[in-house]
Image (cartoon, rainbow, N blue to C red):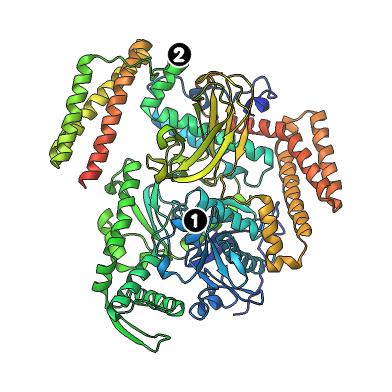
Amino acid sequence: MALLQISEPGLSTAPHEHRLAAGIDLGTTNSLVATVRNGISVVLNDERGRPLLPSVVRYLNDGVTVVGYDAQARQSDDPHNTIVSVKRFMGRGLKDLVDLSTLPYHFVDAPGMVQLKTVVGAKTPVEVSAEILKALKMRAETALGGELTGAVITVPAYFDDAQRQATKDAARLAGLNVLRLLNEPTAAAIAYGLDNSSEGIYAVYDLGGGTFDISVLKLTKGVFEVLATNGDSALGGDDFDRRVYCWMLEQSGLSVLSDHDKSLLMAKAREAKEALTEHAEARITAVLTTGELIDLTLTEGQFNELTASLVGKTLTPTRKALRDAGLSAADVKGVVMVGGSTRIPRIQAAVGEFFGQTPLTNLDPDKVVALGAAIQANVLAGNKREDDWLLLDVAPLSLGLETMGGLVEKIIPRNSTIPIARAQDFTTYKDGQTAMSIHVLQGERERVSDCRSLARFELRGIPPMVAGAARIRVTFQVDADGLLSVSARETATGVEAHIEVKPSYGLTDDEIARMLRESIDHAMDDVDARQLAELRVDAQRLVDATQSALAENGAALLSQSERTAIDALLGQMNAALTTSDPSAIKRATEALNQGTTEFAARRMDVGIKRALAGHKIEDIGI
Amino acid sequence: MGSESSAVLDSDSIMDFNQDHFALLGLAPAFAIDGERLDQAYRALQTEFHPDRFAHAGEAEQRLAMQWSTRINEAYQTLKSPFSRAKYLLELQGIQAMDANNTAMPAEFLVQQMEWRESLMSTVATADYPGLQALEKAAKAEADRLLGELAADLDERRDYLAASETLRKYRFLEKLLADIDNAYAELE
């Protein structure tokens, strides 16, 4: 189908330019990109009218990278260089991975995150994911006829900090401005909730290709409040395929397979699973490279038996989420099904039985996450005004610190509404101790060895004191993306030793720049030019934001001299933008940021007055 | 950072990063609160300050939004739970009710706790579901009674030392109820 370009209706009469924003569902098996057009969220198809992009990346030895259906088609021929389900490796070390025997890749153990050896060298899961994101970015920009202002990228609600950070890094590497990382079930709830204008308690059961999430939400007058979330970041449709694959080996008496045959039989297992959603049995035939012929029939009953424990594994987190929310299955008004794997009839039956109601499936379970992400992206990009709706999400896993005896002291409990900050005081163990080592962990278990290690850092320069006299305040901050930063300072003496840490698996700006240089398609364009372009976009965004803030309440909140000062900074910025000097643009941006801090604070003040208007003045306590 | 920016505000400003949780949420400081109003004030404030409202704003506003949204979440979570609300009211009076030095409890209360703990262990060991339900009912009734006492201590008698002891008792009950909840999970 030829792609016709149609401009946004009403664009010329709109007071603000419509900013191009997209929602991206970066899935284990398939990925999608959606946008809001004429007030309606739509999935953007490829040039052949297909909505899905298989999350498959193939590296060729001539430096060309193929993404999607074309890569998927060559999966069995070129298994080592064709990476499928890369999402399972995001933010994961070699020791975290299970079922390595069924994977045809050559893994390289690297600090922080595993790498995959390909014909063009070792690739990190971040780089592989960035290829998928680049393809989606290009699809969106072609369809929308312009550069994207920003994107919302979805992640499983149960993704930990390492997996979230890896996703954000992949987006940066793909040249996307990430407006927000959004939890997949929450995105689905937005798509459903806004469609049905529902109120009450909803559960979102999201079984994708490689991850399982369950979220319990309360919908009230335009507020989506996540009460609890739980899940398993290594459980999905892939596991159902693997059960069928192992059954096939058992039935055929096979044990050692070539990588080609592994890929072939895994693909056949998937086909059989998919056939069973509509038929009572599926025939599986394949010819192996050895010449051996496989001809098997799998019935729905056999399939259900093979995968019964996997279905059970989704109900345990479901119970936990309800308990954390202080609710029972009977309190739930509707159950939303998300993810391709919820097409499996046995899963629909099990979920229906658990909640005592038929689950909602009226939106396409493959598309609903991307549709919700696009709606959120449209709001975050500033295309809609305040009076719409608000999303309050939670941190899925507890965060804590290692204390004496290898135990974890929880600082932020799971299911805390984000953004959140918590501080905890610690003291020294020995007289004259001047340094303290801080180990940050994520997880629910009590022992350090059972939780995920996020970062280790040392606080140095503590003034020497007797043991127990120093007061080290460690502060955890989780932002609206669910990402953690940790700082520590010594408070007893007023001497500040302060450190900001980024967990060790996150990429530094230098690493991102290096990867950009190394990546083939960026070797041709100039890295400096790209950085300049990014600085310009940021600077322009700040100018726009400042001007709209001035228009809204500059007159009310600023004195003449203050207004003149900000106007002067805007003038300097505009002058800097006419040059191609990155450092001048950077300086002007910093100056404008600095010079508008006070104005921003006053605007916030107006906001709080507006929010509390309607309350009696004596209640406010002034 | 908050104090730096609030220092430059107008004198009639109500925006004070150090104001107490009740003032922030527009409620009178008391143990008995209108939960509906708390929820409404919380949603109204988050609607104004959540970082999602500032995703396209300048850096300074984005940073302030995160700080304020964090602050609003903290205030709401503290006031929503009866335990943390009472603890916080006592802190406003300069009393650290859960301080390690404040551990003395009446003997009869402790005996009752031990009996309930033993009963919990035996119901789990014997998978005695009705027994667990009976225990939960008794513990909930006692927890509710203590909440009533807390309200009287804090709001009517303003006897903060008595309130501290009631709060410590309530803490025991809260832990017991959490363990009963876990026991249900084990029995499932």
Q: What element does badge 2 sit on? A: loop
The residue lying toward the viewer, choosing from B46 and A560, is B46
The residue lying toward the viewer, choosing from A159 and A516, is A516
Image height of A241 relative to A574, above or below:
below
Chain assignment, label 2: B
Q: Position of residue A78 (x, y in %)?
A: 53, 78
Q: Amino acid under label 1?
A: Arg
Q: Position of residue B64 (x, y in %)?
A: 63, 35
Lateral position of residue B12 relative to residue A568, left or right:
left
Q: Are marks 2 and 1 in contact (CB under 8 Å)?
A: no
Q: Which mark is residue A581?
A: none
The residue lying toward the viewer, choosing from A362 and B167, is B167
Q: Which residue is mark 1?
A: A92
Lateral position of residue B25 relative to residue A543, left or right:
left
Residue shown at 32%/77% (left/top)? Answer: A248
Q: Position of residue A327 (x, y in %)?
A: 31, 43
Lateral position of residue A387 relative to residue A276, left or right:
right
Q: Which residue is mark 2?
A: B93
Q: Position of residue B44 (x, y in %)?
A: 51, 36
Q: Nearer the viewer, mark 2 or mark 1?
A: 1
Q: Tell me where residue A275 sits by quadrant.
A: bottom left
**Residue A280 appears in the rendering:** no
Q: Tell me where residue A129 sits by quadrant.
A: bottom right
Q: What element does badge 1 sit on? A: loop
Question: Hey, which residue is sitting farthest bottom in the picture?
Answer: A291
**Residue A421 appears in the rendering:** yes
Q: Amino acid under label 2?
A: Gln
User: Is disc 2 surrounded by few (<14), some (14 to 19) or many (20+) residues within 10 Å?
Assistant: few
Chain assignment, label 1: A
Q: Quadrant of the N terminus of chain A?
A: bottom right
